[in-house]
């Protein structure tokens, strides 16, 4: 067997197309589940597994308006 005798295997050209085809066959929640804490999604943005999220742990600091106008008294 030489290099010029080699041929591509039968099937999808790339792993991505193979995975996309698998997702299309599975349908609906696509193995993500329906009654789990995530309910069909991998994880919610900012969710830390029950720990208090970072955005709620950090203290709020005041608001500074970048468009404020200063008036002379």
Image (spheres, grey):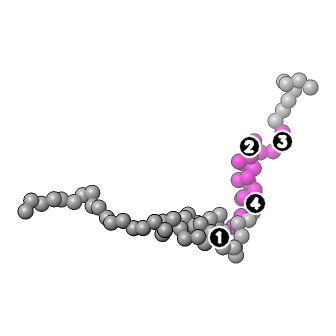
- Which tag is nearer the camera, tag 2 or tag 1? 1
Q: What is the x, y in percent for residue 56? A: 48, 69
Q: Is residue 13 above or below residue 23?
A: above
Q: Which mark is residue 18?
A: none
- Which tag is nearer the camera, tag 2 or tag 3? 2
Assign a secondary structure to mark 2. loop
| Residue for badge 4 | 25
| Residue for badge 2 | 14
Assign a secondary structure to mark 4. helix
* Label 2, label 1: how far apart the Cα atoms are: 30 Å
- Which tag is nearer the camera, tag 3 or tag 1? 1
Q: Nearer the viewer, residue 14 or 51?
A: 51
Q: Residues within 10 Å of mark 4 (few under 14, many from 20)?
A: few
| Residue for badge 1 | 38
Assign a secondary structure to mark 1. loop
Judge from the rendering whether residue 68 lies leftward or rightward of residue 1; answer left or right.
left
Q: Residues within 10 Å of mark 1 (few under 14, many from 20)?
A: few
Confirm whether residue 61 shows in the render. Answer: yes
| Residue for badge 3 | 10
Q: Nearer the viewer, residue 3 or 72?
A: 72
Q: What is the x, y in percent for residue 1? A: 92, 26
Task: Confirm or deny contact between disc 3 and disc 4 (CB under 8 A).
Answer: no
* Label 3, label 4: how far apart the Cα atoms are: 19 Å
* Label 4, label 1: how far apart the Cα atoms are: 22 Å
What residue is shown at x 39% (from left), y 67% (from top)?
60
Task: Confirm or deny contact between disc 4 and disc 1 (CB under 8 A).
Answer: no
* Label 3, label 1: how far apart the Cα atoms are: 37 Å
- Reading the chain from its start, which is encountered first: label 4 or label 1? 4
Q: Which residues are magenta?
A: 9-30
């Amino acid at each position: 067997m030489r290099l010029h005798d080699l041929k591509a295997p039968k099937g999808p050209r790339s792993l991505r197309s193979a995975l996309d085809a698998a997702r299309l066959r599975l349908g609906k929640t696509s193995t993500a589940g329906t009654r789990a804490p995530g309910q069909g999604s991998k994880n919610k943005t900012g969710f830390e597994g029950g720990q208090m999220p970072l955005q709620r742990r950090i203290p709020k600091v005041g608001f500074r308006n970048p468009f404020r106008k200063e008036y002379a008294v």
